Image (tube, grey):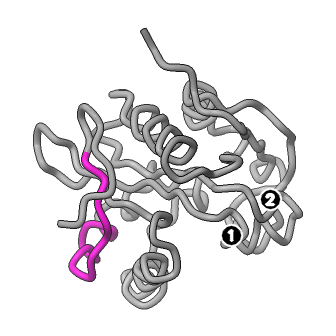
Amino acid sequence: MSIFLETARLILRQFAPADVENLMSLDSDHQVMRFINGGTPTPTEVIQNQFLPKILSYYAKYPHFGFWAVHEKVSQEFIGWFHFYPAIENPFAVELNLVTPEEIALGYRLRRIVWGKGYATEGSKALIHKGFTELQVPRVVGWALAENLASIRVMQKAGLQFERAFAFTEQPLPNLTTAQRQAVKYGSDRPPAVSQ
């Protein structure tokens, strides 16, 4: 296991080809996928032939950026992933003029069984701290659909501030209405405050 980062309760590691089943389990939960694409499970062939190969390609392209499988320390179970990569790698964000080359995009997708435990905030804070203190990133950004209040709260708790409202186009989110595609961008150019 190639560990990228550890927190008090989480282990973030590189993905491997054997993670297809982990990703299928995560993306088969319609509640997990609700704010991703309206609740539609990701087809197995898309995970095998597109998503996982893309994840694995980041490790060769960027030594310290990409997608990280996350495990709960106490159970050792796979519980989802975080991403922390150059925001210009997201074609939809580029199309919308949402990002600039110096920005690093933060994101996460966690299994419903661990929602409410603070893992998204814990992992996000650790990645942002590592980004600013070790990797010398100039800016960290994140975005979420405006209806996804839980993710917005995570960004706020992680020290990101509201920057702008925008709307996704129909192409990346064809199962959502125009109103449901409304979104917000948050960002910061400094590490989060350390909790006492």
Q: From the top left corner, tell me how far across and down residue 150 is, in percent.
A: 55, 32
| Nearer the observer, 103 or 81 | 103
Where are the magenta residues, as a range?
11-24
Q: Is residue 110 above or below residue 100?
A: above
SS class of the residue under badge 1? loop
Tag 1: amino acid: Asn
In screen coordinates, is 148 left or right of 103?
Answer: left
Q: Residue at x 42, y 85 (%)?
A: 53
Asked if marks 2 and 1 touch (Cβ < 8 Å), the reply is yes
Which quadrant of the structure image shows residue 73? top left
Provide residue 127's location: percent of width, then percent of height: 47, 45
Q: Residues within 10 Å of mark 1 (few under 14, many from 20)?
A: few
Q: Residues within 10 Å of mark 2 (few under 14, many from 20)?
A: many
In the image, taking residue 94 as reference, residue 151 lies left or right, namely left
The dot on residue 159 is: none
Q: Residue at x 36, y 35 (%)?
A: 119
How far is disc 2 from disc 1 in space, using C-alphas?
Answer: 9 Å
Q: Callout 2: helix, strand or loop?
A: loop
Q: Which quadrant is the N terminus positioned in? A: bottom left
So how many labels did they put on this image? 2
The residue shown at (40%, 88%) is 45
Q: From what the image shows, is residue 112 above or below residue 193? A: below
Which residue position is annotated with label 1?
Answer: 90
Please give the label number shown on residue 99: 2
